[in-house]
Amino acid sequence: MEDFGEKAVDFFSKGYNCSQSTAAAFAEYLGLDLKEVLRGMAGFGGGVGGQREMCGAVTGMIYILGHIYGDYDPHNTEAKTALYKAVRELSDKFKAEFGTTNCRELLLKASIIPKPDPSERNAEYYKKRPCAHFVRKAAELAASKLSEEKENKLA
C-alpha cells in the first residue's frame, strides 16, 4: 500500500493546511478529484478556520474515514455506529501519541503561540511547526483502517 503519511507531509510542505494535506494524500487512491478535496477541506485548517479547536490533520483523517465507512443508508444505525467507532478509535490513537486532538494544545506543547490567521509558509515556519508529524500520523492511522477494510473485503 502507498505511503500515505509521506504523501500527506509532501502536500503540507507545498503549503496546504493540515486538513487538506491529510485528506489529499488519499484522493488518487480513492478516486476522488484532488481539486475538490483540497477545496472542501480548506476551511478545516488551523483547527477549523483558525479557531485552534480540533486539529486539521484529525479532521482530514475523519474525512477519509467517511469515505471508507460512510457509504450507507442514513437509517442504517449499524453502519453509522461502525463509522463513529472508527472515528473514536483513531482519534484516541492520535490522542495517545500526542496527548490531545486540540490544535491549540498541540501548538502550545511545541511552544508556539496559536494565532487565528495563517502564518507565512517559509523555512522558519516549517522548522518550528510540529504539524508535519500530526499530518503524517493522521494519514498513517487512516491508511491502517483502509488496509483493514481491504483485508476484510478479501476475507
Image (cartoon, grey):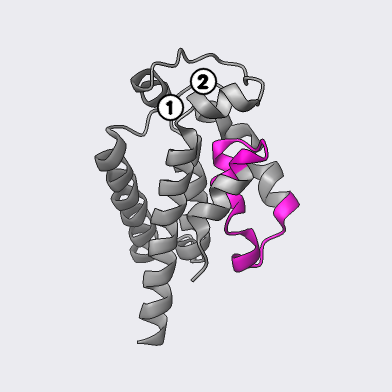
Q: Residue at x 44, y 66 (%)?
A: 146
Residue named by callout 1: 103
Q: Is residue 6 left or right of residue 142?
A: right
Residue named by callout 2: 51
Return the residue found at the far left.
96
Residue 125 shows up from this direction: yes
Q: CA distance from mark 2 to mark 1?
A: 9 Å
Magenta-drawn stretch contains 30: yes
Q: Secondary structure at mark 1?
A: helix
The rendered magenta stretch, by its main secondary structure, is classed as helix
Viewer-side residue, 96 vs 91: 96
Q: Residue at x 57, y 32 (%)?
A: 45
Q: Is residue 112 left or right of residue 155?
A: right
Looking at the image, residue 20 lies above or below residue 116: below
- For the residue marked with disc 2, what is the amino acid? Gln
Q: Are marks 2 and 1 in contact (CB under 8 Å)?
A: yes
* Residue 54 figure quarter: top left
Looking at the image, residue 24 lies above or below residue 16: below
Q: Count up the numbered dots.
A: 2
Q: Nearer the viewer, mark 2 or mark 1?
A: 1
- For the residue marked with disc 1, what is the amino acid? Cys
Q: Which residues are magenta?
A: 12-35
Q: Is residue 154 left or right of residue 96?
A: right
Q: Position of residue 61 (x, y in %)?
A: 47, 49
* Residue 55 figure quarter: top left
